[in-house]
Amino acid sequence: MSRPTSFRSLTDRPTIYALSSGRPPAAISVIRVSGPGAHGAGERLCGTLPDARTAGVRELRNPATGEVLDQALVLRFDSPASATGEDIVEFQCHGGRAVVDAVLAALRGIDGLREAEPGEFTRRAFANGRIDLTEAEGLADLIEAETESQRKAALALAEGGLRKQIATWQERLLALSAQAERAIDYDEDDEVADPALVAGCADLAVDLRLWLDRPRVEPLKDGVRVVVAGPPNAGKSSLLNAIAGQERAIVTPIPGTTRDHIEVPLAIEGVPVVLTDTAGLRPADDAVEAIGVARAANLVGAADVLLWLGVPGDAPAHPRRVMVHTMADLAERGAAPEGSIAISSLTGEGMSALLNKVGGLARSLLPAEDAIALNRRQAAELACAADALAQAGPAADVVIVAEALRQARAAFDRLTGRAGVEDVLDALFARFCLGK
């Protein structure tokens, strides 16, 4: 698969090297060399290389001095059947700092080699068609994964789950495009697109919309945003402290104590969330408090789950809103309004029911563990393709349909990284560690 890239041709690219395992000290460290001079560099250090895709124990020596550096397991991979699509040599040496530094210094002294930049190995794999952009994004997420759910979602992308689905859509799209072009060339008397062509575009658009309706990956990566909101002195900060299990927010009887929002990352019912305390919503004369109130209103609008601690009739509209009746331990508070959960941050009354409710709502926003989840960039390109296909209506001119299909193909090319994504690539591979 061809990939537009800013890289030079394979033979012109410098050979790169880097420590690809964790920072020493460690039991074993892996040093990778990739590029047209990789095999030559490997021979300079260890003499004869093992056969391709096999491992051999070799003595590593400094090419300049002949000094023995280490005894290592050496692996050789030949282009294009390698991780980067280039010739590769890997040294699995002892993981002491001195050993690693000595091997890297020996490689540094070989003409034509330079140290790899962050993500450069993976970027070369992308440039050489070994992976597409969605798989590269999955690898970046896999490196950053901190929970089992994040690992599974990232692995589904990294192993090509979305790429395979995109390939299926592209086959349908190309077939429709061929049908449209054939109609333009041969059906000169009929300018309106064939109903079968229009129906095919509509069916593909429906499939794309179904994928767009799936839960996205961002809540899984960043945490579901649970916002606590309401008027001053409603118990917002006390509730945040009770859920967090620590004193994160200042609690006083003075209205307007919270001037800015406070965020606490935690897990509720096993779901990663970002619990956010906000300033009390009320008209404010104080300039600082007014800023906090404005920010609180914005946070309410951006909330994934809203915990409303005020009068139910004053609650802002929200698709996942939980009415909370606080300070239920105080007799003067009376019974909780219908549909509200009565809680006490002091005694813990109702907290279990509230957390169960919030956990269920938060979980509904996460992708299933066996499902492929789109990120914002992928969803935006998929939406562009669906919008383009929507132009192919029942009465559309066949030329319009052909243009709509061309726009959809361009969106898929951006989705997989085949065109127009240089800025995306720079941002993506900057997330990778050195040696990946």
Image (spheres, grey):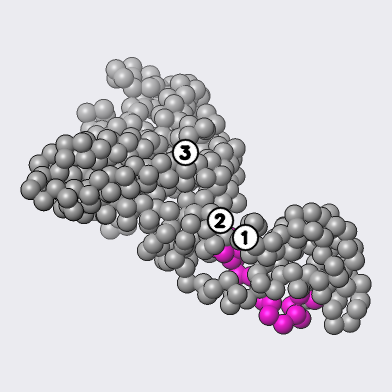
Which mark is nearer the camera, 3 or 1?
Answer: 1
Q: Amino acid at mark 3?
A: Ile
- SS for dot 3: loop
Q: Choose the circle earlier in sequence order: 3 or 1.
A: 1
Q: Nearer the viewer, residue 366 or 310?
A: 366
Bounds of the magenta segment:
106-124
Vertical arrangement, residue 371 with respect to residue 402, above or below:
above
Please identify the residue farthest to the left as the structure is shown. Answer: 189
**CB contact under 8 Å: marks 2 and 1:** yes
Q: Residues within 10 Å of mark 1 (few under 14, many from 20)?
A: some
Label at residue 55: none
Name the residue that disc number 1 marks: 80
**Front: mark 3 or 2:** 2
Q: Is residue 253 above or below residue 121?
A: above
Distance CA(mark 3)–CA(mark 1) = 28 Å
| Crowd rating for badge 2 (residues with CA inside 10 Å; few <14, some 14–19, many 20+) | many
Report which residue position mark 3 lands on.
372
The residue labelled by disc 2 is 130
Disc 3 to disc 2, how far (Cα)?
A: 20 Å
Q: List x then y, in percent, for residue 378.
A: 39, 49
Identify the element where label 2 is drawn. Answer: loop
Q: Residue at x 29, y 39 (%)?
A: 204
Question: Closer to the N terminus: mark 3 or mark 2?
Answer: 2
Counting from the top left corner in percent of width and height, residue 294 is at 28, 51
Q: From the viewer's perspective, tell me whether residue 163 is left or right of residue 38.
A: left
Whether pointer 3 and pointer 2 mark residues with C-beta atoms closer than 8 Å, the reply is no
Q: Residue at x 43, y 53 (%)?
A: 416
In the image, is residue 301 part of the stretch drawn in magenta? Answer: no
In magenta stretch: residue 107: yes
Image height of 308 relative to 248, above or below: above
Q: Position of residue 391 (x, y in %)?
A: 18, 46
